Image (cartoon, rainbow, N blue to C red):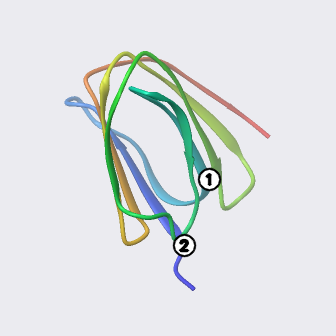
Amino acid sequence: MTDLYLEVVTPEKILFEGPVGMVEVPGELGRFTVLRDHGPIISTLTQGRIRIIGKDGVERHFLCRKGVVECKENRMTVLMDHTTGVEEGK
């Protein structure tokens, strides 16, 4: 069983990289959640909150203005033009 592996990237740096349990993103047509073994998807992102629950149970939030997400074969990449902040909690 392969974990869902996530990368969250801006032009300046990699904000997050590692295995996750769940990712929720603000898609162009509405919010959607990605779990392990999700089907392939490419979507544009609108302004909103990206919510990540890591394998360690820690919940993280990134604020997105716009971007693109791709998920294929348990690898998910979020490319954002900018983030305005990060929140972390459990």
The residue labelled by disc 2 is: 3
User: Of 53 and 35, which appears nearest the observer?
Assistant: 35
Whether 63 is drawn above or below 78: the answer is: above
Q: Residue at x 66, y 61 (%)?
A: 55
Residue type at tag 1: Met
The residue labelled by disc 1 is: 22
- Residue 33 appears in which quarter of the rendering? top right
User: Of 76 and 9, which appears nearest the observer?
Assistant: 76
Residue 80 relative to residue 53: left or right: left
User: Of 85 and 67, which appears nearest the observer?
Assistant: 67
Q: Position of residue 38 (x, y in %)?
A: 50, 64
Q: Most extreme residue toward the left, as rendered?
A: 11
Q: Residue at x 42, y 15 (%)?
A: 47
Q: CA distance from mark 2 to mark 1?
A: 10 Å
Q: Position of residue 19 (x, y in %)?
A: 53, 63
Residue 30 relative to residue 71: left or right: right
Residue 19 relative to residue 54: left or right: left
Q: Secondary structure at mark 1?
A: strand
Residue type at tag 2: Asp
Q: Secondary structure at mark 2?
A: loop
Whether 35 is drawn above or below 69: the answer is: below
Whether 64 is drawn above or below 9: the answer is: above
- Residue 56 appears in which quarter of the rendering? bottom right
Q: Residue at x 31, y 20 (%)?
A: 82
Q: Residue at x 37, y 72 (%)?
A: 73
Sequence-first disc among 2 and 1: 2
In the rendered image, the quadrant that contains the N terminus is bottom right
In the rendered image, the quadrant that contains the C terminus is top right
User: Of 46 and 51, which appears nearest the observer?
Assistant: 46
Q: Most extreme residue toward the right, as rendered?
A: 90
